[in-house]
Image (cartoon, grey):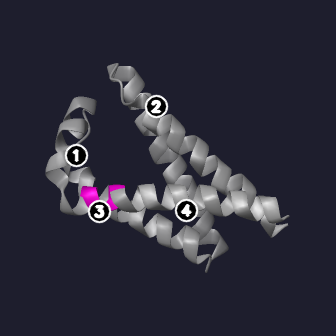
Amino acid sequence: MKTNKILYWTFTILISLWMLLQGVLFVFMQDTIVPVFESLGFPLWLIAPLGVAKILAVIAIVSNKSALLKQLAYLGLAVEFAIALISHLMVGDSQWPAAAVALVILAGSYIFGKRISQ
C-alpha cells in the first residue's frame, strides 16, 4: 500500500508540474506556443483556453474534492495527450515522444490513484 501511494504521488506530482508549466506558457507566453500550433494546423484561439483547462485539471486532480471532477480532469488530459500524439505523428515532427511520455505518466497517476482508493 505504501508503494502505491509513493508511486501515485510521484506520477501525480510529475504530471501536475508539467501541466502547470504548460498552462502558464499557454496563457501568459502564447508566442512560444504559436509555432507549434501552426505546424499542427490547430487554431490559435485554442491556446489560452487549453492552458486554463490544464491548470484547472491539475487543481481537480490534486485537490481531490470531487471524484467526478477528478475523473473528468484525467479524461480531458488523456484526450489532449492522445490528440497531441496523433497530431505530431501525422505531421511527422520529432515532438511526439513528449505526448507519449505524458500519457504514460498520466496513466501511472490514474492507475495508482485507483489502487490507493480501493
What type is the residue that disc 4 sits on?
Answer: Ile
Q: CA distance from mark 4 to mark 2?
A: 20 Å
Of mark 1 and mark 2, the one earlier in the sequence is 1
What type is the residue that disc 1 sits on?
Answer: Ile
Residue drawn at x 53%, y 56% as measured from the top left: 14
Q: CA distance from mark 3 to mark 2?
A: 21 Å
Determine which of the numbered discs, if any, sits on residue 90 in the image. none
Q: CA distance from mark 4 to mark 1?
A: 23 Å
Of mark 4 and mark 1, the one earlier in the sequence is 4
Name the front one of labels 1 and 2: 2
According to the image, label 1 marks what residue?
Answer: 33
Name the front one of labels 4 and 3: 4
Of mark 3 and mark 1, the one earlier in the sequence is 3
Asked whether the beta carbons under mark 1 and mark 2 sit within 8 Å of each other, the answer is no
Q: Residues within 10 Å of mark 1 (few under 14, many from 20)?
A: some
Residue 30's x, y, as percent? 18, 53
Which structural element holds mark 2? helix
Determine which of the numbered discs, if any, sits on residue 13 in the image. 4
Residue drawn at x 62%, y 76% as measured from the top left: 64
Determine which of the numbered discs, if any, sits on residue 24 in the image. 3
Q: Which residues are magenta?
A: 22-26
Locate residue 67: give its quadrant.
Answer: bottom right
The chief SS type of the magenta part is helix
Q: CA distance from mark 3 to mark 1?
A: 11 Å
Q: CA distance from mark 4 to mark 3?
A: 16 Å
Q: Which image quadrant: the N terminus?
A: bottom right
Residue 17's x, y, as percent? 45, 61
Asked whether the beta carbons under mark 3 and mark 1 sit within 8 Å of each other, the answer is no
According to the image, label 2 marks what residue?
Answer: 97
Residue drawn at x 53%, y 71% as measured from the top left: 60
